[in-house]
Image (cartoon, rainbow, N blue to C red):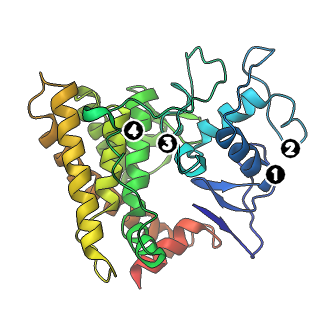
Amino acid sequence: MDYSYDEDLDELCPVCGDKVSGYHYGLLTCESCKGFFKRTVQNNKHYTCTESQSCKIDKTQRKRCPFCRFQKCLTVGMRLEGASPAHLGPLTAGPQGAAGGPGRGAEGKGTVSGSRWGEGPGGQSPAGPLRGSSLQVADQMTLLQNCWSELLVLDHIYRQVQYGKEDSILLVTGQEVELSTVAVQAGSLLHSLVLRAQELVLQLHALQLDRQEFVCLKFLILFSLDVKFLNNHSLVKDAQEKANAALLDYTLCHYPHCGDKFQQLLLCLVEVRALSMQAKEYLYHKHLGNEMPRNNLLIEMLQAKQT
């Protein structure tokens, strides 16, 4: 999704540090990085770095190395799915592209594949039958307003499963924060929230959660049957049933030795919801104490949920 803002934003682009122009492909970025990311994915650009794949990316040097710029786009959390052509389906960029995770230790060559990621049973992606474009815009917005916090929590959890370490958490910016630092500086409420999230990370790591299952879980969160005031509830129900069946088929086909993996993943969704509720309560508490920026997208969404 791509939203522009008329109001003056204080945030800076996490890719290059330029002024943010709106919400593009999963997070607030500047217009230049939005356009660069879109062109890279839709035109299937192939980049290489002439240095050590660690070039500095800022407002003045962002055009010098497109390879490192694209990797930074992925690292900070820009979503490939939102920029891919509709007829291609989701695109991947190797290990670096998974859930906006940084390519630490990966030997990527800066290529962007135009093929679908690993196919599930029957030769189609687990998310292949699901398309949100047939939903009315009002229904799409209602679904997102209902589950945005759960999607953010699941993104965070998956990032830790793929790239995190046991004694630290990996932020969407690519920064690592030691758990000991969280315990000392963040306060007891946030520390307990982080520890609870880490327990879920360990559980999903033990289950060997992969990219296809992660995407199916996001669909199950998005197409929730608990959402009220939908214009086309039957379409949402059909989408959830397809996502449910796709996840079941995929786990049985690719992990036959883990007969209960499907059930275990669904149980993890319950914990994701509980974590998202706890996180929203924490953020709203901070907001009431004037400890959060006023012009903050998260706070706007929290306030919309409260009304």
Q: Which residue is drawn at 73% across and 27% down?
A: 67
Q: Please identify the quarter of the rendering in which residue 126 is found.
A: top left
**On the rendered image, what quadrant is the C terminus found in?**
bottom left
Q: Are marks 2 and 1 in contact (CB under 8 Å)?
A: yes
**Image: 184 above or below 297:** above
Instruction: Specify the label residue 18 is tagged with.
Output: 1
Return the residue at label 3: 90
Q: Which residue is drawn at 34% across and 82% down?
A: 231
Q: Extreme right residue here? A: 60
Residue 122, position in %: x, y?
A: 26, 34
Return the residue at label 2: 59
143 with respect to 263 (left or right)? right
Return the residue at label 4: 158
Tag 1: Cα neighbours inside 10 Å, few (<14), some, or many (≥20)? some
Q: Give the spatial CA distance, label 1 vs label 4.
A: 28 Å
Residue 116, position in %: x, y?
A: 46, 35
**On the rendered image, what quadrant is the N terminus found in?**
bottom right
Q: What amino acid is at disc 2?
A: Lys
